Image (cartoon, rainbow, N blue to C red):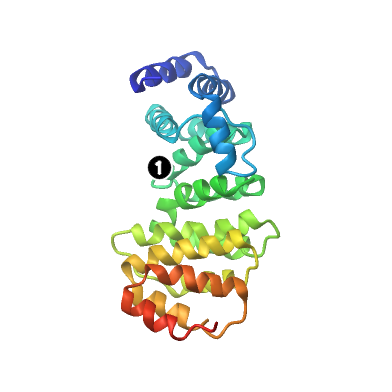
Amino acid sequence: MDNDILRNSLRQAITAAGSANGLANEIRSICRRLGTPENIKGAARFIPGIGESFGVQLPALRIMASELLKEFKQDDERLIALVECLWENASREERVIAAKMLERMGKRMPERVVELVRKFSPSLRNWEECDQLGAFGLRYVVQRRPELVFAQCEQWQLDPQLWIRRLAVVNLTSLPKAKDYEPSSRELALLDVAMQDNAREVQDGIIWALREMAKRHPAIVKRFLLRYVTTSHRGVKRVLRQASKSLPLEMQQSLGDRLVS
């Protein structure tokens, strides 16, 4: 579907829908028309536990999220109600749209966004939902009001659900993208706790967060990793090997010489 046609279809749906739930169902219908069987199969291979999917590509979902934000920028309550309906409808596409909307909403209503992410987190089913919610949905909140997110992360790290524990880490990947970013002791403390997690999915989140940090502050990442070079924990050793790849070559060599084989 052409982007202009998509925008027009969405505007018509907004006009026709009488409620947030009605609009969410109209969006679901648009997603059904946009998707393809080939994309459904491809996404299912790439995202284990994907749930219901219509096979819509990400650029179209970004356009839909952007148009919805423009339409309801003066009506926060209706915007929030729509995000809740989209997430609860639970298709892959609707949840991605909801997360993309939360990302922009975080600039104006950080407390409400954290509240919504907390509400949605128990229903996380796979890495994509987790990362869309954490790395994108919380992006501007964690950059501008990190104390709101860190307090929640400390609770998420104790959760038995692995996607919630991963959520506590992947939101940190947005911090280095802030213009005035400096790693904080509280951020590093969250990573310290995560390093004890045996779930590979959480370890992958740590690697991602450390690689992003290394782009801005490689020396801090090196010091963090050096504290674990004598570990016998297989997961931590994997984090050391993978995260160190983002360091300058001389730092990689220095760290590599100290790793326990």
**Residue density around tag 1, few if under 14, some if 14–19, many if 20 or more, within 10 Å:** many
Q: Residue 24: x percent and y percent?
A: 55, 25
Seen at 60% across and 32% down, the residue is: 91
Picture quadrant of residue 20: top right
Seen at 64% across and 63% down, the residue is: 199
- Figure check: 65 above or below 227: above
Quadrant containing the N terminus is top left
Seen at 39% across and 60% down, the residue is: 175
Can residue 136 be spotted in the picture?
A: yes
Left or right of 72? Residue 206 is: right
Q: Nearer the viewer, residue 141 or 30?
A: 30
Q: How many marks?
A: 1
Q: Residue 248: x percent and y percent?
A: 32, 73
Picture quadrant of residue 180: bottom left
Left or right of 183? Residue 46 is: right
**What residue did someone put label 1 on?**
104
The residue lying furthest to the right in this view is 160
Left or right of 2? Residue 51 is: right
